Amino acid sequence: MLVLSRQRDETIMIGDDIEITVVDIRGDKVRIGITAPRSIQVHRKEVYDAIKKENENAAKLKPDDVSDVVRRNGSATNDKTENS
């Protein structure tokens, strides 16, 4: 882990496209601003972990599990398409 000291309004660059700026410091809290391309997702660690866990759980589903959900919730197709 690289540890850097920064003061308010100072920036750290990650590669050529990502800027991390110290926006404010209040007591033991630091507010940071992140500028990154839209193609790069930026999440708090706890949100990232939750997304990762949900994706792993979804990857473990079997076809029968999915059809059970569809049966319980009704058809997943659009009614207009079926009537055409």
Image (cartoon, rainbow, N blue to C red):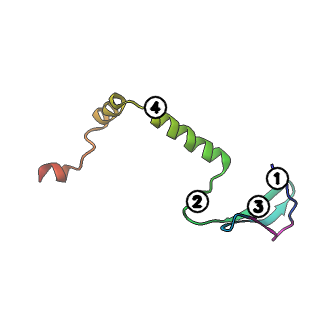
- Three-letter amino acid code at the position of disc 2: Ile
Q: CA distance from mark 1 to mark 3?
A: 19 Å
Q: Please provide the residue range marked out in magenta.
A: 7-13
Q: Is residue 81 magenta?
A: no
Q: Nearer the viewer, residue 30 or 64?
A: 64
Residue in the image at 61% along x and 46% along y: 48
Tell me which label, 2 or 1, sits earlier in the chain.
Answer: 1
Identify the residue under disc 1.
2
- The vertical placement of 83 against 67, above or below, is below
Identify the amino acid type marked 3.
Answer: Arg
Name the mark on residue 31: 3
Identified by mark 4, the residue type is: Lys
Does the CB distance between marks 2 and 1 fall below 8 Å?
no
Query: Quick one: quadrant of the C terminus?
Result: bottom left
Q: CA distance from mark 2 to mark 3?
A: 20 Å
**Do residues under tags 1 and 4 come within 8 Å of each other at their CB atoms?**
no
Mark 1 vs mark 4, foreground winner is 1
Q: Which badge, 4 or 3, is on the more N-terminal residue?
A: 3
Q: Which residue is mark 4?
A: 60
Name the secondary structure under disc 3. Answer: strand
